[in-house]
Image (cartoon, helix red, strand yellow):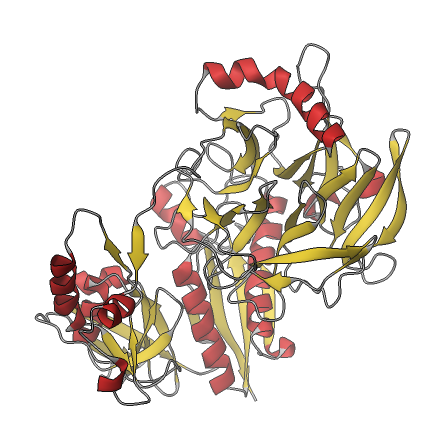
């Protein structure tokens, strides 16, 4: 480890002037960034920069390959030389560098081809300028059900922190820890718990040298910004308790930020990737690390905790099966007195959700002072009014049925509402954004379940240029599709992906297919039969609007859900 730190210190001299001269501005590595997808940078003890490049035509799998290993060096003057492809560390699948136990050893994740290379983390040894295969690390019940993998070896070589989708994940990819048992043998991955993992994606984690701080990216926010970088502190000696994640404002932008990694022993510099000012793919960036660890944090407690502490609502006052439930923590600031906090809590308690159990379809009740929204739900074929039911999804991914628009409005007012769904037996449900509740009348047409019926999945959003789901409402609508398919086991559907006509037609077609495939993958992971979901990708060949306007291009970027047949 000391050799690694010494090598890193020498390597950093090449960056120090540029970084310190621009304070905390982000510095793109222009010599390395390309129109392709640069992701997951890792520095070797020798100062080389290893990273994955997706969709590069020189990859082993060609332009559809999710990631091969590439490497770049610096000249004696500190300039970056042209990056080189490392075929001996690459496969036709997704390949990601995890870390360097020493200068002559590298760990690489391979998604596997099912024949020669198994899915997992593999060890290679450096031989001159090439790498020789050694073995696959034994890691208990490791299994990744996602096309994405990210992870890093800790500085002391004792743990690997990773993002995978596996048994017990809360949403898509979650953060896990595996600890070394002996050379080549590691523990089964352990989920880091709900303090950091959500119903969305938690990706590209790294861990500080003392194993007390993690940095990771997540799309669990509902702002539509894509992925942001967060920091969380470990609480205690275990791996299941963490402080509330803090966004890293020095790097977060309207783009998607990933792979934040503090790479020097003085914790002064970090590297990451961003899609800001790119064509939707990741570019490599450098930044002076903003140390958040010494900042004073506000004490945050849930309403239920404060009510119990102040003895305003006691668990013994409620029926045994009742739970007090809220998704919006109340921040207790130092300037507030306890009396003021109690008064505020008492006022909020009138609108807290009380449910019998946290299961789907349990009715919840709010008290609200306003109700102005009305729903008019019709059959899309006959235009006749039909009966319907409402369900809402809150910020923690819990779906519950609701009684009225009044309930939805109150949930929106208290920032608990992510999306809501209008459903009727024999019809394809529609998932809507809370924004529509600002209208006085919501006129909705539901499509009957019959062969040829088509619905555009408007609430499923992808990060630009990728097949990755962008936000919480996307996951909410996916879950609605899962419910629909399970409620209609005789239905076979077709998912058709479409893009606008900007860019390379072949890449657009591949991207549209990847997005349809991503949705099918989610449905099948949730229990829908694979044979019940067919996919197609049409790229920009079937526009429904004028590609000459941004509004038209937005309409053309879509995924259609079509009833293929009813058995």
* Residue at left offset 81%, top offset 51%: 122
Q: Is residue 456 visible?
A: no
Foreground residue among 426 and 168: 168
Q: Quadrant of the C terminus?
A: bottom right
The image quadrant that residue 136 belongs to is bottom right
Foreground residue among 211 and 329: 211
**Would residue 521 be found to the left or right of residue 51 on screen?**
left
The image quadrant that residue 347 belongs to is bottom left
**Would residue 251 be found to the left or right of residue 13 on screen?**
left
Foreground residue among 431 and 103: 103
x, y percentage for residue 103? Answer: 80, 33
x, y percentage for residue 86? Answer: 80, 36
* Residue at left offset 51%, top offset 65%: 171
**Would residue 504 be found to the left or right of residue 108 on screen?**
left
Q: Is residue 357 visible?
A: yes
Give above or below for 447 relative to 9: below
Give above or below for 95 relative to 424: above
**Would residue 29 be found to the left or right of residue 104 on screen?**
left
Q: Quadrant of the N terminus?
A: top right
Q: Residue furthest left?
A: 369
Foreground residue among 160 and 445: 160
How many tags in the picture?
0
x, y percentage for residue 69? Answer: 74, 39
x, y percentage for residue 297? Answer: 34, 45
């Amino acid at each position: 480890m000391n050799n690694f730190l010494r090598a890193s210190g020498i390597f950093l001299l090449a960056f120090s002037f540029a970084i310190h001269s621009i304070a905390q501005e982000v510095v793109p590595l222009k010599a390395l960034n390309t129109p392709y997808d640069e992701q997951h940078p890792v520095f070797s003890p020798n100062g080389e920069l290893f990273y994955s490049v997706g969709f590069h035509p020189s990859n082993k799998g060609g332009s559809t390959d999710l990631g091969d290993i590439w490497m770049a060096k610096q000249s004696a003057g500190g300039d970056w030389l042209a990056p080189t492809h490392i075929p001996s560390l690459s496969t036709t699948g997704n390949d990601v560098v995890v870390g360097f136990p020493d200068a002559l050893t590298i760990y690489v994740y391979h998604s596997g081809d099912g024949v020669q290379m198994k899915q997992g983390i593999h060890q290679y040894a450096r031989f001159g300028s090439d790498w020789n295969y050694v073995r696959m690390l034994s890691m208990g019940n490791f299994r990744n059900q996602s096309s994405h993998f990210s992870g890093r070896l800790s500085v002391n070589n004792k743990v690997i922190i990773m993002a995978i989708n596996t048994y017990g994940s809360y949403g898509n990819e979650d953060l896990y820890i595996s600890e070394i048992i002996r050379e080549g043998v590691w523990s089964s991955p352990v989920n880091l718990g709900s303090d950091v993992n959500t119903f969305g994606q938690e990706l590209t984690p790294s861990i500080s040298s003392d194993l007390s701080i993690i940095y990771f990216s997540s799309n669990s926010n509902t702002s539509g910004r894509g992925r942001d970088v967060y920091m969380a502190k470990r609480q205690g000696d275990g791996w299941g308790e963490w402080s509330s994640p803090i966004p890293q404002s020095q790097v977060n932008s309207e783009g998607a930020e990933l792979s934040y990694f503090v790479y020097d022993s003085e914790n002064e510099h970090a590297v990451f990737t961003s899609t800001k000012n790119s064509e939707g793919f990741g570019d490599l960036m450098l930044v002076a690390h903003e140390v958040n660890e010494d900042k004073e944090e506000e004490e945050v407690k849930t309403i239920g905790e404060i009510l119990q502490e102040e003895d305003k609502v006691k668990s013994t006052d409620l029926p045994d099966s009742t739970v007090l439930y809220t998704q919006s923590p109340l921040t207790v600031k130092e300037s507030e007195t306890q009396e003021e906090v109690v008064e505020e809590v008492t006022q909020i308690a009138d609108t807290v959700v009380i449910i019998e159990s946290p299961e789907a379809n349990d009715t919840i009740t709010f008290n609200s002072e306003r109700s102005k929204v009305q729903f008019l739900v019709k059959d899309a074929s006959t235009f006749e009014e039909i009966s319907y039911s409402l369900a809402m999804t809150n910020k923690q991914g819990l779906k519950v049925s609701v009684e009225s628009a009044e309930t939805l409005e109150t949930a929106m007012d208290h920032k608990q509402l992510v999306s809501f769904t209008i459903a009727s037996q024999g019809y394809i449900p529609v998932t809507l954004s809370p924004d529509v509740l600002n209208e006085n009348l919501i006129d909705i047409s539901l499509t009957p379940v019959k062969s040829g019926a088509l619905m555009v999945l408007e609430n499923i959003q992808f990060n630009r240029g990728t097949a990755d789901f962008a936000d919480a409402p996307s996951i909410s609508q996916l879950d609605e599709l899962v419910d629909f398919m399970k409620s209609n086991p005789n239905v076979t559907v077709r998912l058709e992906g479409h893009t606008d006509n900007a860019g390379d037609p072949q890449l657009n077609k591949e991207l549209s297919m990847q997005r349809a495939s991503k949705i099918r993958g989610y449905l099948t992971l949730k229990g829908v039969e694979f044979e019940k979901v067919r996919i197609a990708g049409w790229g920009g060949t079937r526009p429904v609007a004028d590609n000459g306007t941004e509004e038209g291009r937005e309409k053309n970027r879509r995924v259609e859900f079509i009833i293929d047949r009813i058995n």
